[in-house]
Image (tube, helix red, strand yellow):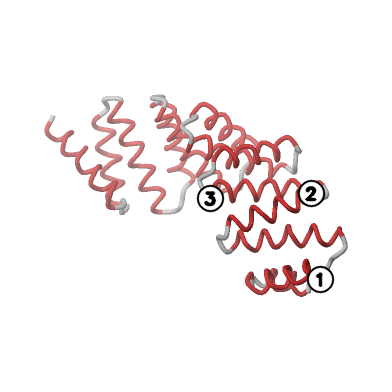
Amino acid sequence: YYFRAGNYYDKGCYDEAIADYTKAIELGLGKDLLVRAYYWRGWSYGAKGCHDEAIADYTKAIELGLEKDLLVRAYYWRGRSYGLKDCPDEAIADFTRVIVLEPDKSLLAEAYYFRAGNYYDKGCYDEAIADYTKAIELGLEEGLLVLAYFWRGHSYGAKGSLDKAIADFSKVIKLGSDKGLLAEAYYWRGLSYYNKNCPDEAKANLTTAIELGLEDKLLAEAQAVLNQIRSQ
């Protein structure tokens, strides 16, 4: 059951994997395989969006005594599940454990990135900025790198550090390829320019954001700001 579960997992058949890991646990695996069964069942639950069950299994695996490589990943994935459940304090605690355990550089960078996001959600912008900066320095993979600049830009904007926010949104525009994210970067850079009393730059950025297909809620706000600029 345990090894069949692993093959189901590799195929992305998470319901079947969960069923087999559960049966293997019930039948009485030896400790080494038992702890791995809880870990991989947790991962399977997480892949299905069942975060309460994932957290319970990662916790059980941690309690039973995972080897370091899997232990750090159990804390990482439990932190991800806590974050997706809007439990930022628990997520921050788990990502901090990952950082303390000093995993490989790639996972370390991601731990800083996701801890930053939970700090941001709590309104702890200084801590978020510090963690996004560390994640960027460690070398995030490209997809997360552009998001780190985007959210660090938001964090700077929330603190009123408009020049730094503009610099980060400019980095997103330079690195980004996703049209929706580019539209938002132009929008937020435009608002930053507007708040700096730079109406020409604000107008150019907001116009580009609209042309790129800004989502409806931000579209209405962009048009409102453009109308204010035109009426001045």
At a point 50% along the width and 44% down the height, the residue shown is: 147
The kind of residue on which mark 1 rests is: Leu
Reading the chain from its start, which is encountered first: label 1 or label 2?
1
Asked where in the image residue 5 lies, by quadrant, the reply is bottom right
Which residue is at the front of the view, 21 or 213?
21
Which residue is at the front of the view, 104 or 141?
104
Q: CA distance from mark 3 to mark 2?
A: 23 Å
The kind of residue on which mark 2 rests is: Asp
Foreground mark, 3 or 1, reads 1
Q: Quadrant of the N terminus?
A: bottom right
Foreground mark, 1 or 2, reads 1
Q: Is residue 50 above or below residue 23?
A: above
Badge 2: residue crowd in 10 Å (few <14, some 14–19, many ≥20): few
Which residue is at the front of the view, 77 or 163?
77
Q: Position of residue 25 (x, y in %)?
A: 78, 66
Q: Position of residue 174 (x, y in %)?
A: 46, 43
Q: CA distance from mark 1 to mark 2?
A: 26 Å
Q: Position of residue 88 (x, y in %)?
A: 54, 40
Q: Is residue 6 above or below residue 203?
A: below
Q: SS of the residue at dot 3? A: helix
228 with respect to 35 (left or right)? left
Q: Position of residue 225 (x, y in %)?
A: 21, 37
Which residue is under mark 3?
84
At a point 80% along the width and 57% down the height, the residue shown is: 35
Badge 3: residue crowd in 10 Å (few <14, some 14–19, many ≥20): some
Badge 1: residue crowd in 10 Å (few <14, some 14–19, many ≥20): few
Which residue is under mark 1?
27
The disc label shown at residue 69, or none? 2
The kind of residue on which mark 3 rests is: Leu
Reading the chain from its start, which is encountered first: label 3 or label 2?
2
The disc label shown at residue 63, or none? none
